[in-house]
Amino acid sequence: MSDVQSQRQAPRVVSREAWRAARIALLEKEKELTAMKDALAAQRRSLPWVRVEKDYVFDGPHGPVTLSLDGTTWDGPGLEARAQNGPVSVSIPSGYQSGVVVESEGHSPFQCQASVCSEGRKTWEEDVKRIEFGNGPAVVRVSTVNGPVSVD
């Protein structure tokens, strides 16, 4: 028997009513802790953002990559998001003007349902599907290998 085990005392045995009162008191403390964690998480989400001043690459191997663009233009140097064997989901608002490329290698499904899809330049080859939106050079690139693509 270890020192820790020998120092530990067995729990008290009490009536069901005493156990229930102790459990309710503990439950109240657990609820307080949950409320404090929720408030802390809300404070974290409300922190100010920092402008990305350089090209940013997000690599999500074996996992999904989800990207939601906002506004009408990308205001930054560049963004590249890649996945391998994982799905890619891109949300593009109507009227988006910055250059965007979404590409899939392999034989995975490619769905493009955003309003910009009808205006996009599509390249469908045997195992590469690519669609380009917007004006000017592509500042946002999203790609996957062997993963489905959804553009909404």
Image: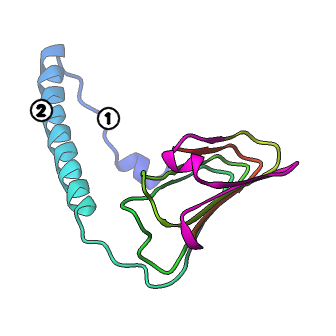
Badge 2 element: helix
Pinpoint residue 97: horizontal percent, then vertical percent: 47, 65
How far is disc 1 from disc 2 in space, using C-alphas?
21 Å
Give the number of the disc on residue 25. 2
Three-letter residue code for mark 2? Ala
Give the number of the disc on residue 99. none
| 19 and 11: which is toward the camera | 19
In the image, the segment drawn in magenta is 111-137
Pinpoint residue 110: horizontal percent, then vertical percent: 69, 42
The residue at 42%/68% (across/down) is 73
Pinpoint residue 36: horizontal percent, then vertical percent: 17, 51
Left or right relative to 115: residue 48: left
| 118 and 43: which is toward the camera | 118
The residue at 13%/35% (across/down) is 28
Direction front: furthest residue? 119
Location of residue 100 by image quarter: bottom right
Pinpoint residue 56: horizontal percent, then vertical percent: 54, 75
Sequence order check, earlier mark of 1 and 2: 1
| 130 and 150: which is toward the camera | 130
Q: Is residue 132 magenta?
A: yes
The residue at 43%/54% (across/down) is 3
- Is the C-beta separation of discs 1 and 2 under 8 Å? no
> Is 111 rendered above or below residue 96?
above
| Crowd band around label 1 with a 10 angstrom C-alpha radius: few (<14), some (14–19), many (20+) | few
Direction right: furthest residue? 126
Badge 1 element: loop
**In this figure, which residue is indicated by the disc labeled 1?**
10
Q: Does the image show residue 141?
A: yes
> Is 6 rendered above or below residue 48?
above
Three-letter residue code for mark 1? Ala
The residue at 38%/59% (across/down) is 70
